[in-house]
Image: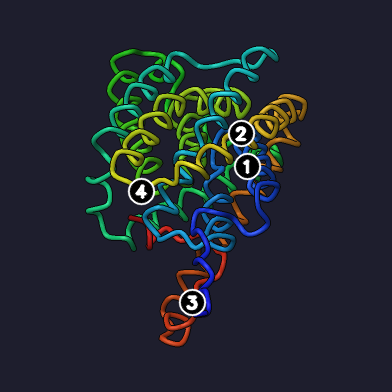
Amino acid sequence: MPAEHPAPPNPAVMRGGLLAELGVGAIGGMIGGLFGGGSGVFYVPALEHLTALPRPTLHGTATAANTAVVGVGALTFALAGGSIDWNAGFGMLVGGTIGGLFGARLIMKVSHATLRWLFVTVLLLSALKLGLDIAGVHLLQGGAALSAAVVHNWIYVAPVSLACGLLIGAWAAAVGLGGGLLAVPTLMVLFGCDLHTAIGTSLLMFVPNSIVGWIMHARQGTASPRLSLTLNLGALPGAIAGAVLALGLNAKALSATYAVFCLFVAIRELVRMYRARSPQVDAAPQDSVVAVADAP
């Protein structure tokens, strides 16, 4: 009898099986709940390392997997007494939804190098600002770049929050990572939110964006239905734990945690950018660092 050839492994099945998928979802959920999003900075390298998904599907699945993170995280934040800045949050929510619908293809027309440097710059500036806040050095009045009279004036808030939401929402839908790490410092610097409020507002902002992103990627076949579901299921308890932890930390402890996380992600991205310049590295298999430039 002819020898039977084993079936090729399913690229959408994670090494380690269902338990590994739920575990990855839980860790991503905790990261997202704690930092107001940003679960993709864990999901993308984890999926890259543990699955055989092609690059577009990898990033699309990371986008889809964020739905439970932000939905449950925002709900937990509200029920546990966290505050949300509706003044800026509503405009960013609307802009983020539009960005998820129409902005993904537009933002990816910008050069990859520009996007990566912008991402790293925001992370490093966020870490610097939070570090200065911890040290008691406040360079910005009330934490914002503009006066309180301006940041609470709808003539400023409406267009600026809408534009910021559009850009950040497009980034999150297209790349599947880092949206919360852009939204939180934006809310702090441009609208004067404290860190706890910025995290809660960021979670709420990404609820419709993540749903839209999941639908768009599912329609074009760039999100694994199976992994999207299992990662979201795993994220449910993780997002609750992360949001509760964020609310339980005082301002200095949360600022320090957030600053270290921003610095860690920025360094990882800089390392990848440096290594990508080497032909030897380009020819080698990709490692597990965040891969913004290879996004769809």
Q: Indicate which disc, 3 or 4, sits on the residue closer to the N terminus.
A: 4
254 left or right of 98 in image: right
Residue at 24 percent across and 46 percent down: it is 105
Q: Position of residue 178 (x, y in %)?
A: 48, 45
Residue type at tag 2? Leu
User: Residue 163 location, x and y as percent?
Assistant: 29, 30
Are there few (<14), some (14-19), or many (20+) residues within 10 Å of tag 2? many
Q: CA distance from mark 1 to mark 4?
A: 19 Å
| Amino acid type, mark 1 | Gly
Q: Which mark is residue 25?
A: 1
Which badge, 2 or 4, is on the more N-terminal residue? Answer: 4
Give the mark, 1 or 4, whose residue is nearer the N terminus. Answer: 1
Q: Earlier in the sequence, mark 2 or mark 1?
A: 1
| Up-down relation of residue 138 to residue 95 (above or below) | below
* Alpha carbon separation for disc pair 2 and 3: 35 Å
Mark linked to residue 275: 3
Q: Is residue 132 visible?
A: no
Mark 4 secondary-structure assignment: loop
Q: Which mark is residue 233?
A: 2
Q: Give the residue type that dot 3 points to.
A: Arg
Judged by depth in the image, the label closer to the viewer, 2 or 3, is: 2
Task: From the image, state whether disc 3 or disc 4 is nearer to you.
Answer: 4
Name which residue lies at 52% across and 79% down: 1
Label 4, on which residue?
A: 222
Kindly check if marks 2 and 4 are in contact, taking CB atoms under 8 A apart as contact: no
Tag 2–tag 1 contact (CB < 8 Å): yes
